[in-house]
Amino acid sequence: MIAFNKYYNKFNILSISLVIVSLFLLTFKGLNFGIDFKGGTLIELRSTDSKINISSLRDNLNQMNLGDVSVKNFGNETDFLIKFENNENKNIIEEIKKHLEKSFSNNFDFRRVENVGPKVSAELLKSGIIAISVALALMLIYIWIRFEWQFSLGAILALFHDVIVTLGLFSLLGLEINLSIIAAVLTIVGYSMNDTVVIFDRVRENLRKYSDIKIYELTNISINETLSRTLITSITTLLALLSIFFFGGEILKGFSLAMVFGVVFGTYSSIYIANTVLVRLKVSQKTVLKDDKD
């Protein structure tokens, strides 16, 4: 049996440090919002000339003074995704087409053009924040009804940790935040809660079964009893996400990376945050039996 409980205090200090650093980064550095939330233009094009690459295309577009231009491959090496912030010139797309035709001849097929205005991007940001807030609120309501308040507090802190630290890492690395990242954060919330609930269910069962074992030891027993399920789920999920990250193209990298962070932090927090709260609050058999009577 692995003695997870021996490391409760050390990992508590690590978790608190990670949350503090993440909050500092989010407050003073902020997040790198993409076009979805800042507004701008997205162009998807395909080149018929395999010699054209990201570097040559970016250098060519920089000559037009478009500001900060992002050029990425997605799918095939001849497929490009161009992003730049809002431009007041209403004819900018036509000018880009003419400029590229002049520089590279007629070797591009404009497959998709999207414009996101400041008003729309602000509404998307607001909707994203609301979506995450509602998801967290519903999860908390469920866990509050499903378990005793001590268990609920542990789950809440674990969720808070996972979301904040994941966003803190994105801030630290300067990775782009777009709608797919919001979807990833919502998925992380569900994944983290699922891991925590599995262990909490076993803790409650063991509390009813063993009256002479203190919560410090009992949480460790419960973690070990559910460890195979936790590891199998986490490892298989990570393998799928890593496949998406390495082979899914540039567009899916942000989403898959956020999910990788979330799965790792979710597994960690379900062991070293959620269960530690039960130990700190000295949950006992009386806690569960009292709730059963009520």
Image (cartoon, rainbow, N blue to C red):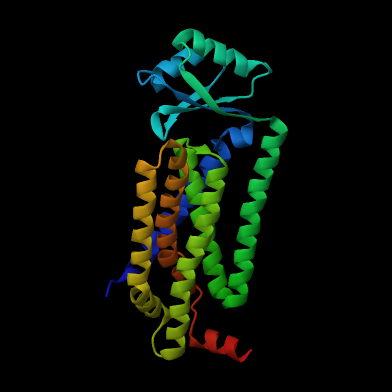
Q: Position of residue 291 (x, y in %)?
A: 59, 86
Which quadrant, please, contains the C terminus?
A: bottom right
Q: Is residue 288 above or below residue 42?
A: below
Residue displayed at 48% across by 14% down: 106
Q: Position of residue 251 (x, y in %)?
A: 47, 38
Q: Residue at x 35, y 60 (%)?
A: 236
The quarter of the picture where residue 257 lies is top left
Residue 209 lies, with reference to residue 230, above or below; the image says below
Q: Find the residue positioned furthest to the right.
A: 119
Q: Quadrant of the N terminus?
A: bottom left
Residue 102 to residue 130: above or below: above
Q: Residue 62, can we see it?
A: no
Q: Quadrant of residue 117?
A: top right
What residue do we see at 61% from left, 73% from top?
A: 144
Q: Nearer the viewer, residue 208 or 176?
A: 176
Q: Residue 146, position in %: x, y?
A: 58, 76
Residue 99 visible in this rendered orientation of the protein: yes
Q: Residue furthest left?
A: 1
